[in-house]
Amino acid sequence: MPNTNEGDAVDRISQYEAEYNLLQAEFAQQLDDISDLSGKARATALEAASATLDGMNEQLVHIEREKQHLPSTARAPVNRRFRDYNSDVDGHRRKLRSLGLSGTASTGDKYLDQRQQLLSGTDRLDQSSQRLKASEALAAQSEDTAARTLAELQRQREVIDHTNEGLRESETYLDRSIKTLKGMSRTWAVHHAYP
């Protein structure tokens, strides 16, 4: 039976995946709309699609964090879906860049700088998201290592406490044995001193 943290992680991952899928559907519609636009309307639509793509990437960051709380058996299918999501996002980002570049080549108007800035900003956001994902994965790993270390220290402490308790019992038995031997020694001495 999964523990509470594990169950919570599964629920949260499902929510993030549902949000990701909604954003992906929205992004597909935005791409269809962009192909029919030009000028300022196209630049605005490209910007909106880029924001949707960032939202999808944000859901992936959440999923990456939550899947660290799953046991390896439950994590495997999530990892497979996660790889597919990442691949989709990369493909979407390339498609978005292609649409931005094709719009720039065909119009050659005053929105050239805006489109270039948009593409540059998209690249920076992508790099930042990748760094954030790597940092969160490292933090989750460190947290997991710390938890395992604390559990091991607790186990060792219990062993030491148990050992100390055993030693105290042994000392008690030893004291009794010494007293018994002294009593026997005195009795023997008395009997042999006065035969």
Image (tube, rainbow, N blue to C red):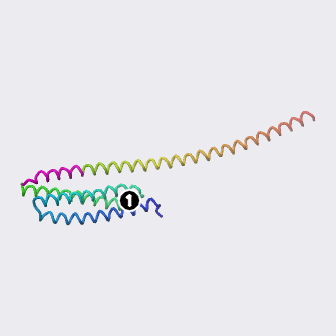
* Rendered residue at 46%/61% (across/down): 4
Rendering quarter of residue 66: bottom left
Rendering quarter of residue 182: top right
Which quadrant is home to the C terminus?
top right
In the image, 14: left or right of 121? right
* Rendered residue at 65%/46% (across/down): 165
Name above or below for residue 96 compared with residue 148.
below
In the image, 191: left or right of 114? right
* Relative image position of residue 158 (x, y in whole percent): 58, 48
Q: Nearer the viewer, residue 87 or 128?
A: 128
Q: Nearer the viewer, residue 101 or 84?
A: 101
* Rendered residue at 10%/59% (across/down): 39
Q: Main secondary structure of the magenta part?
A: helix
Q: Is residue 121 magenta?
A: yes
Residue on which disc 1 sits: 75
Badge 1 amino acid: Arg
**Element type at mark 1:** helix
In the image, 156: left or right of 101? right
Name above or below for residue 39 compared with residue 163.
below
User: Which residue, as the protein is rendered here, is positioned at the far top?
Assistant: 193
Residue span colored magenta? 109-125
* Relative image position of residue 102 (x, y in whole percent): 10, 57
In the image, 185: left or right of 171? right
User: Which residue, as the protein is rendered here, is positioned at the far right?
Assistant: 195
Callout count = 1
Q: Is residue 116 magenta?
A: yes
* Relative image position of residue 100 (x, y in whole percent): 14, 56
Q: Label 1: few (<14), some or many (≥20) within 10 Å?
A: some
Name above or below for residue 166 compared with residue 111.
above
